Amino acid sequence: MRKKNCVYCFIFLISILILTSPVLASHGVADDKKVIRVVMDDNYPPYAFRDDSGKLQGITIDQWQLFEQKTGIVVNITGMSWNNAYQSMLEGKFDVVDTISYNEGRDKILDYSEPYATIDVPIFFHKNISGITDVNSLKGFAVGAKRGDNAINELMKKGITNIKAYESAEAVIRAARNQEIVIFVMGKPPSLYHMYKMGIHNEFNYVSSLYTSQFFRAVKQGDKSLLNTLNKGFSSISKAEYKKIQDKWYGKTTQPIYETELFRSAIITLVIILAVILFLLAWNRTLHLRVRQKTKALSRTIDELQTSEARAKAILEAIPDLFFMFDKSGRIMDYHAVQESELYMPPEQFLGKSVADIFPAELSQVMLAAIGKAIESKKIQTIEYNLSIHHNPSDFEARLASCGSDRVVGIVRDITERKKSEERLVDISIHDSLTGLFNRYYFENEVARLKGEVMHSLCIMMFDLDGLKLINDTLGHSVGDQYLVAASKIIVDAFPKDSMISRIGGDEFCVIVSDRTNKEIQTCISRFNEGLNNINKESHIIQMSISYGYVFAEGESLDIHEMLKEADNRMYRVKLHRRRSMKSEVVQAMKKMLEERDFITEGHATRMEELAVGLSRVIGIQEKDIDDMRLLAQFHDIGKVGIPDYILTKPAALTKEEFEMMKRHTEIGHRIAESSVDLLPIADYILKHHEHWDGSGYPFGLRGNEIPVECRILTIVDAYDAMTNDRPYRKALSKEAALEELKRCAGTQFDPILTGEFLKMMKKF
């Protein structure tokens, strides 16, 4: 029992540490708050080494930092000598060991990740030694190597046992500089780095690699979960991101023109030409022809140089960026600008002056530091800053590159539009385009963030716009969007400005309010209900209905996910109670709207019902099905609520396009009927009530008995009633003329048998 309690205490302490960690809060750590302890060699440039202040840097460090950003897992990195790092991993002090290469001995105790770097391991030897061609030629020499390095295993497998081990790569190179060793075997990148740093790169040669190694990350054998996490996390880093890190540390060399082979060749050529000319003048005038030929060649070279200069000038003119030349103290020595109006001030006010005399103090300090670092490191330095040009705040990017030992070229680009585009993209990524509220992406991130915060109270409210699908299907998505915008405005107006209000689904909204009393929340709910009532006082085809549920909690033990689930459940229960009555109200509202538009009048419905029921009884339809005929007579044209007024009221014949729109009313009516329990039995009849006996109807082109008998009856009585009553585009026909038209169309538009029965029935009226 005591052992269990200790385990529970340990888990509790780890959870508290993760929740309160500012590093996790700033990096958006995943919900399990996992921390990975990593150990590596701290003297293996450019993969992992320390700067002048002792801070770890390099390719591997940058990759781990990107891993941390991609996965949300916190990574604690420790650097030490390789031998100590490996031993610490074996002792279980760390979860992952990095900068490790594979060998059979390690494979028995560690599991390896995918390799991420290939390292050549050459044989380095002093330039005064000859005869070193491969590993077999090392016998008899003392060979330097890094303690614990896999190179020692490879040497011993080849029979080389006279090995001097040093704690780090730097220690090996220092021993070579002090001539303690004249041969050593070690990875090429750190070897060249320290050799150049100590100035002995010209003192040593190297031959083909002893072997080619690969860098892995390794975990304790059997820890498959952590290994999968590593492989998945590093595979999420794109090739472009890997390349960016690689370019950062390996760099891209830009050779000065005076060091190029072409430049040296040109100088040599010019010297030779001049020498030949002098020789020919002194030796023999008969060689004048050859001199002239050489002179012509020289002229062509000069022309080419002038053309090249003109080309370079044209390129500068074509590039919109600003160019500046600085000395090492930050003085502006020269400049180039296509338009001088783009400059911070006129050239006469800044040429020969230091940036400290021109720009604000904060910017000048950053720029001077970048200039110094560019000269010192010989690497391009990039800074971004904001500056007002002619009272217009603008953003700029300056790229500074060394030009010799005491000059720096600066290329300055206006990135104001790029910054604005980035800000717009950020805004689009977190806001709903229709309502302007936060979107689900932002909502989920904020929920994850709030989980780690301490709040005195928290209220979560879930809202759902009832009947949105029915509104979209019948009135169109544009009307549905208007309802969504109106609903969002009601919610926004009801709650405090600092509330987090998000649209988290098609018809769902969520409001999160923190550090408010229950009384304040009730006031917000009252404002919401008042806003909903006010908008429903306006003229709407369908009254707006919004279901909601909320949870309010106080205290420090607030589980935001449980509160979200409970608020959603409460909202859903309210929605279930409203659903049936809501749909019935919508259908009745649509019927009322049609009556107001004078397309389903009470008289029309009564006449249709009387005629349809009469014909149904004549042909022997059962009484239980006659109730459906009554409903069909009243609601067969319910889909016309989705047809524009200008088509319904047009006094002339419809165009082809208008008729196609009119034909959609059967499909709209079908969707409305399917959403209503009361109209569901006649939904199929509404869809097919414009089918014709000969297959010329719509929407399916059904023929004969494929058409439900209820639809065939309705087609006859609807046509008769339409002909005997006024329409916007014509006057009513007489009873006799209407019956004659029915008789004429029997067998084409109408069922011939039912038409005959209807004609007999109408003779009795």
Image: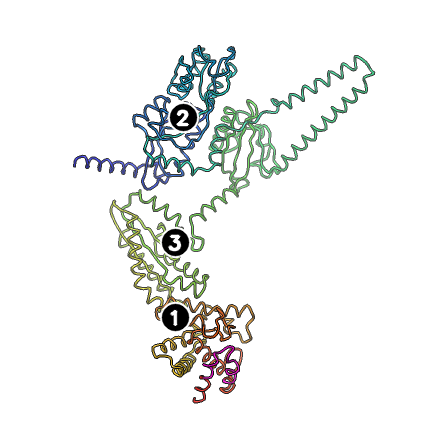
Q: Amino acid at mark 3?
A: Arg
Residue bearing mark 2? 101
Magenta span contains residue 755: yes
Please state the horizontal and vertical placement of residue 566, each as a whole percent of the image.
28, 53
Q: Amino acid at mark 1?
A: Ala
Q: Disc 2 or disc 3, which is closer to the eye?
A: 2
Please state the horizontal and vertical placement of residue 299, each as a whole percent of the image.
75, 25
The span from disc 2 to disc 1 (Cα, nearest Å) is 76 Å
Magenta span contains residue 625: no
Q: Disc 2 or disc 1, which is closer to the eye?
A: 2
Q: Residue at x 42, y 72 (%)?
A: 685
> In terms of secondary structure, what is the magenta stretch mainly?
helix
Q: Which residues are drawn in magenta?
A: 739-756
Q: Earlier in the sequence, mark 2 or mark 1?
A: 2
Q: Quadrant of residue 164?
A: top left
Q: In this view, which residue lies farthest toward the left?
A: 1
Please state the horizontal and vertical placement of residue 741, each as a whole percent of the image.
52, 83
Q: Earlier in the sequence, mark 1 or mark 3?
A: 3
Residue bearing mark 3? 503
Q: Nearer the viewer, residue 707 or 281?
A: 707
Q: Earlier in the sequence, mark 2 or mark 3?
A: 2
In terms of secondary structure, where does tag 1 sit?
helix
From this view, report whether residue 271 is shown above or below residue 643.
Answer: above
Q: Is residue 377 visible?
A: yes
The span from disc 2 to disc 3 (Cα, nearest Å) is 51 Å
Residue bearing mark 1? 589
Instruction: Please identify the quadrant where the N terminus is shown.
Output: top left
Q: Residue at x 65, y 33 (%)?
A: 313
